[in-house]
Amino acid sequence: MTLLTDFGTTDYFVGAVRGAILSVNPQACLVDISHEIQPGDISAAAFTLLAAYQSFPARTIHVAVVDPGVGSQRRPIVVTAADQFFVGPDNGIFSYILERERDARVFHLTNVSYFAPWISSTFHGRDIFAPVAGALSQGVAPEELGVEIHDYVRLPVLTPTRKANGDLVGQIIHIDRFGNCITNISRSELPAAPSKRGLRLTVNRKEIRRLQRFFAEAGNSAEAFAIWGSAGFLEIAANNRSAAEILKAKRGQKVIVLTD
């Protein structure tokens, strides 16, 4: 079972979630993906989960709690996809999993008998998501936990668009702690030689022409370059420097792959 939150590690929150899971299933194996998502940053959590979930075996249960709408009318859900389970709020946090895994199903958690006896309006991670995850780990089926829904919340799709002239328009979807800018462009969307002059892409009106195999291939150059990252997306990086700082790039900015 994995945990992904914006709780940090200073307060009691992560420990309380772990305790609530272990109270249901003392044999549960708990793995932290991250608790350092910026507070309320649903998109960052969605990307982090997308980048991590395929590393885990079948029947893994992922508890993802970045939940600025806790206590409101937003629904608690469980998603089944890729022979794994995803438990958390219906706020788009599972959007990228749902976009990639076509066999996914989503259930609104309504069976309160699997929740904590007393539910705080500010801590559904402990009182709803953790007990439900514990129940799943003991073989309770999603159908027992709630009703299937199809009107779940989605973030904007990851798929890049293409201009009439053939240029591919993507965007930066994540900037990691090293300053690498991860785009939403996958190998299937980018030909080996997108233009006659090789790879050419622009970010923030700055052009990048190099596609490298590994970071140190740049030597001591301070220029930004493109590289295929471990999450399967095209990244913009710089050797031992922050590409985001060099390019003054931010999440959400366009990345255009030129084809002329």
Image (cartoon, helix red, strand yellow):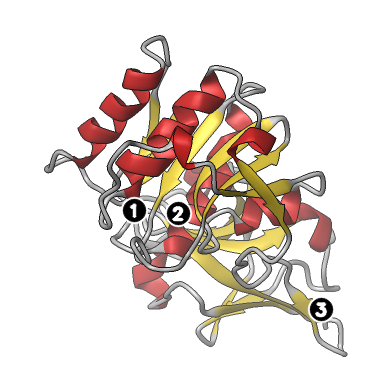
Query: Neighbour class for label 1 at 10 Å: few (<14), some, many (≥20)?
Result: some
- Residue highlighted by disc 2: 45
Q: Nearer the viewer, mark 3 or mark 1?
A: 1
Q: At label 2, which amino acid type do we have? A: Ala
Residue 216, given in percent of the width and then of the height, sits at: 48, 43
Kindly indicate whether the residue at mark 1 contacts the one at mark 2 (C-beta within 8 angstroms).
Answer: yes
Q: Is residue 197 above or below residue 230?
A: below
Point out which mark residue 259 bears.
3
Could you tell which of marks 3 and 1 lies nearer the N-terminus?
1
Q: CA distance from mark 2 to mark 3?
A: 32 Å
Image quadrant where one finds the C terminus: bottom right
Judged from the image, the secondary structure of the residue bearing numbered disc 2 is helix
Residue 150, given in percent of the width and then of the height, sits at: 73, 61
Residue 111, given in percent of the width and then of the height, sits at: 53, 41
Asked whether, in this view, residue 62 is left or right of residue 38, the answer is right
Could you tell which of marks 2 and 3 lies nearer the N-terminus?
2
Query: Neighbour class for label 3 at 10 Å: few (<14), some, many (≥20)?
Result: some
Q: Residue at the spot x=55%, y=47% of the render?
A: 109
Q: CA distance from mark 3 to mark 1?
A: 36 Å
- Residue highlighted by disc 1: 37
Q: Residue at the spot x=44%, y=62% of the render?
A: 42
Q: At label 1, which amino acid type do we have? A: Ile
Judged from the image, the secondary structure of the residue bearing numbered disc 1 is loop
Asked whether, in this view, residue 119 is left or right of residue 213, the answer is left
